[in-house]
Image: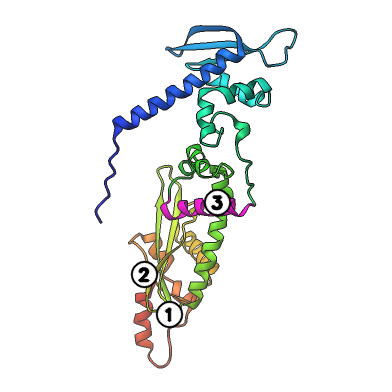
């Protein structure tokens, strides 16, 4: 299948980014000049890099020993704006300033002060709200279906994007995706797979061992069967961490645990492996452990079947 080429106009993207950054700096500087006193600018060096550091005393903070709280920001003014909107967002002077500023007026014309004044944000819906639950499930499915890294999927930029549609929603962070949402999806998907496998009369499994660059071993086990509509179905059963030496006994033990977890002890008739001596040895006694192929009617045919069934 031909790859889809995505072309991005880099010049337009850079210009838009620079314009957005310049607008944010201008707004932040307005907070700096309006709510801070004893303004000072100095150049500092650290690790062979030179920075411009702005500092000032917040005149809205309660004075401790008649000394105003000092705030500093490196290569910009964002800290000053963040300080005012975080600690003084209910101050009437701040409210009036935000409402009267040019940027806030443009936001007000569009019906929101969200970007300029946090108190105007819509109240969060909460994790138990139906819309938030549907969003969480959709995010988990993105990871399951695309295998995108949770660290990327949980990036804060996605949260900013979803708030454009509904500021009451919250995009789940990486920790919630990994610890809560993905385990819930695993339970649902496994239950659906177990129901499918219950209807299958027989199947085959493929097994392979893989080690990461950090020498962490994993055992991948997939199942293949024909369903009731005579369709070939293929699913990954598990890919558990394989600790310790990759001996035949350890391979067989972990494999049996997985297929027993899905109730397949009496449904597996073929095992596909590579030519590794340890994995071949692991299954040389596999089928006699679960089946009795020899019958008085035709023992020779069953013997050949048993030999073929050990490893394919």
Q: Could you tell me how far apart the alpha carbons at marks 3 and 2 are, in whole angstroms?
A: 43 Å
- Categorize mark 3 by other alpha carbons within 10 Å: few (<14), some (14-19), many (20+): many
Which is closer to the viewer, label 3 or label 2? 3
| Quarter placement of the C terminus | bottom left
In the image, which disc is placed on residue 111? none
Against 21, residue 156 (above or below) is below
Task: Find residue 21 and report its image quarter.
Answer: top left
Location of residue 189 in the rendering, given as x and y in whole percent from the top left corner = 51, 63
Magenta stretch: give its range.
129-147
In the image, which disc is placed on residue 136? 3
Disc 3 is placed on an element classified as helix
In the image, which disc is placed on residue 228? 1
The residue wearing badge 2 is 311
From the viewer's perspective, is 38 left or right of 63?
Answer: left
Q: Which of marks 1 and 3 is nearer the N terminus?
A: 3
Query: Which residue is farthest front?
Result: 109
Query: Which residue is farthest right?
Result: 65
Task: Find residue 297 and report its image quarter.
Answer: bottom left
Q: Could you tell me how far apart the alpha carbons at marks 1 and 3 are, in whole angstroms?
A: 33 Å
Q: Earlier in the sequence, mark 3 or mark 2?
A: 3
Q: Residue sitting at 47 percent across and 79 percent down?
A: 291
From the viewer's perspective, is 284 left or right of 33?
Answer: left
Task: Find residue 233 and report its image quarter.
Answer: bottom left
| Quarter placement of the N terminus | bottom left
Q: Does the magenta stretch include residue 141?
A: yes
Taking depth in this image into account, of 188 and 99 the one nearest to the observer is 99
Marks 1 and 3 close (CB-CB < 8 Å): no
């Amino acid at each position: 299948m031909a790859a889809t080429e995505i072309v991005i106009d880099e010049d337009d993207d850079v210009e838009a980014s620079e314009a957005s950054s310049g607008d944010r700096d201008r707004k932040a500087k307005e907070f700096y000049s309006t709510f801070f006193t004893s303004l000072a600018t100095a150049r500092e060096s650290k690790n062979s890099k030179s920075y411009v550091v702005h500092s000032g005393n917040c005149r809205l903070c309660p004075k401790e020993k008649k000394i105003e709280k000092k705030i500093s920001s490196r290569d910009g003014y964002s800290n000053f704006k963040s300080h005012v909107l975080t600690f003084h967002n209910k101050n009437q002077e701040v409210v009036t300033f935000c409402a009267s500023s040019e940027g806030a007026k443009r936001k007000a014309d569009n019906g929101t002060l969200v970007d300029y004044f946090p108190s105007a944000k819509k109240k969060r819906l909460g994790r138990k709200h139906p819309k938030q639950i549907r969003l969480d499930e959709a995010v988990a499915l993105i990871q399951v279906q695309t295998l995108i890294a949770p660290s990327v999927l949980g990036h804060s930029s996605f949260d900013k994007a979803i708030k454009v549609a509904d500021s009451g929603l919250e995009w789940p962070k990486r920790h919630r995706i990994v610890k809560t949402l993905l385990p819930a999806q695993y339970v649902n998907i496994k239950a659906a797979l177990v129901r499918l496998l219950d209807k299958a009369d027989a199947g085959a499994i493929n097994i392979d061992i893989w080690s990461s660059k950090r020498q962490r071993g994993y055992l991948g086990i997939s199942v293949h069967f024909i369903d009731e509509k005579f369709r070939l179905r293929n699913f990954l059963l598990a890919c558990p961490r394989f600790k310790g030496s990759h001996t035949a006994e350890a391979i067989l033990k972990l494999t049996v645990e997985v297929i027993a977890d899905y109730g397949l002890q009496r449904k597996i008739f073929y095992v596909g492996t590579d030519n590794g001596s340890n994995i071949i040895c692991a299954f040389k006694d596999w089928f006699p452990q679960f089946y009795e192929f020899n019958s008085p009617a035709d023992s020779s045919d069953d013997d050949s079947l048993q030999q073929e069934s050990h490893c394919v």
